[in-house]
Image (spheres, coloured by chain):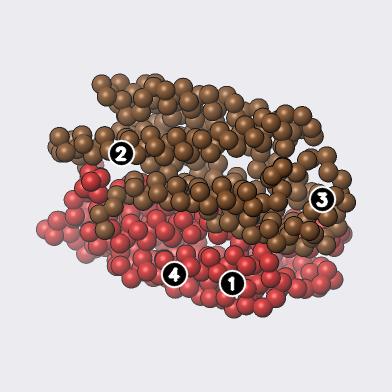
Chain colours: A brown, B red
Amino acid sequence: MNISAQSISLWLAAVFGTVLVAAFVLFPGFLPPMSPEMSSGEVAEFYAENKTWIRTSMVVFDFCCVMLLPLFMVVVHHIKRMRTSTDVFAYCYLSAAASGATILAIANLFWLIAAFRPERNPELLVLLNDLAWITFTAPVGMIIAQNLCLALAVYLDQRPDPVFPKWVGHFNIATAVLTAPAACAAMFKSGPLAWDGLISFWLRLTLFAAYIAVMFFMLRRAMRHEALELQRAPELVPA
Amino acid sequence: MSATTETRPAPAAATSTDTLEGKRDLSICWWITVVFYGLFGVIFVPLTRLMPPPGPDMSTAQITEYFQGNRTGIQIGFVVLMVAIGGAAIAAGLIAYQMTLMSVSKIYAYSYITTLAVGALPGCLLGALAFLAAVFRADTDPEVLVLLYDVAFLTFVGSLGCFATNYLVFAVAVLQDRNGIFPRWLAYVAIWQIVTEVLAAPVFVFRSGPFAWNGVISFWEGTILFGIFLGALIRLSRTAIRRQPIEAVA
C-alpha cells in the first residue's frame, strides 16, 4: 500500500463530503429549512410524518461528518511545511478542528433523539428541535478560528514558492467574516439571521461546502508540489 | 510519494531494547490507561448500571423507577467519571505517540487524536451528564426523564462517526507501517469495529430486538468486540513500549 496518508485523507473527505450533500438533500427539514416560528403542533407533525427520512439522513450525518477531520489534518501538515517562525498555527488549527467536529457530531444527535419518539410531548420535541438547530447553526467560532489560523499562516509564509497562494488566505478571511453572523441564529426567529435565513443557513452552508471543495483542490496541489520538492532535494525530508 | 517523505527510520536492531527502563513517561501513561479503562468498567457496569443497558421499550414508569432505584450508584459512578474521563485523553495520547513511531505520516496520529477528542464528548460524557441531570432532583417530570434516558443511550451507543473514523485511520496506519509497531491483525479487528459502528446505526429506529440499543448486534456484539480490541491494544502497546529505543534523554 503506497497511497499516501494525504491522498487517503483527502479522498475520505471527498467521498464522505459527497455523501453528506446527499444526506442534506434527503433531510426533510433542510429543503426548505424549518422555520423557528413553527408551532409545537407543527413541529410534532413534522417529526411524526417525516421520521423515516429524518432518521436516515441524520444517521448518515452522524456517521460521515467526522470523516472530514482527516482533510483538516492534511491542512495541519501543510501549515507545518510553511516557513513561518513556528508551527503554532498548525496546532491551533488542529485544536479548533477537533472542537468544531464535536459540535457537528452533537447537533445531529438532537435531531435523531427527537425523531426516535415522535409521540413525545410536543413541548419537548420543540426543545430538542431548538437544541439541534441552534447547535448546528450558531457555534461558528471553531471554523472561524480554523479560517483565521490558516489565513495568517498563508500570509506569514516566507517561502519563495508559498505552500498556498495568497488568495487562499483571502478566501479564508472572507469565509470567516461571512460565517460569523450565523451566531445570531441563537436569538432571531425570522429574517436573514434566523437559523433558516439567507445568511445563517444558505450562506453559511454554501461557504462551508465551498471551503471543503476549495481546500480539497488546493491541498492536492500542495501535495504534488511537496512530492516534486522532495524528489529534487530528498535531504530535506523531515525526520 | 509522501509515503517516503514523512518516514521515520525503523528502530535499528542495535539500539532496540526489551525493557521499560528509561521509559518512565510511557510507563506512566500505560498504567493510567489501564486504571482508566478498569474504572470505566466499574463505573458503567456495577455502579451506574448503564451497561448492559435497559431497553428503549421500557415504560415511562419503569424508566422513572430505574433512575430512582439507581440514584446513588449513578451519582457515585459518574462523579468519579467526571474526574477520571481525563484518562481517555491520556490513553489517546499514548496510542497517538506509538503512531508517530510508525513509518507513516503524522497525519494519521493527528486524526487519531482529534477523532477521539470528539468521541469523549458525545460518545461518553454527554450520556453521563444526562444521567446525572436525571437523578439530580427527585421530582423531575417523568417525560423529561424519558428524554434524558434517550439522550444518554442514543449518544452513548449512537455516536458512530467519531469512532468509525478513529478505527479507520488507526487501521490504515497499522497496515501501512513498516516498523511493525502493532501487528496487522489488530488493524483487521479495527476494521471489523467500523462494520460494528455501521451495524449500530439502526439504534435510532428500533425500540426492541437485536438492533435496539440493548440488542445482540448493536450492544453485545459491539461491546464484546470493543473489549477484545481494547485488551489487545493495551497488551500490545506494552510490548511496543518495551521494544522501542529510548529517545533522546537529555
List the residue tagged with mark 3. Answer: A43
Tag 2 or tag 3, which sits nearer the N-term?
A: 3
Percent position (x, y) of residue A85? 32, 24
Q: Please say if the residues under marks 1 and 4 sit with CB atoms less than 8 Å apart.
A: no
List the residue tagged with mark 4. Answer: B192
Q: CA distance from mark 1 to mark 3?
A: 29 Å
Q: CA distance from mark 1 to mark 4?
A: 13 Å
**Is disc 1 in the same subunit as disc 3?**
no
Question: How many neighbours does mark 2 have within 10 angstroms: few (below 14), some (14-19), or many (20 or more)?
Answer: many
**Is disc 4 in the same subunit as disc 2?**
no
**Is disc 2 in the same subunit as disc 1?**
no
Q: Residue at x 59, y 46 (%)?
A: A104
- Helix, strand or loop status at disc 4: helix
Q: Is residue A162 above or below residue B116?
A: above
Percent position (x, y) of residue A74? 38, 41
The residue lying toward the viewer, choosing from B88 and B32, is B88
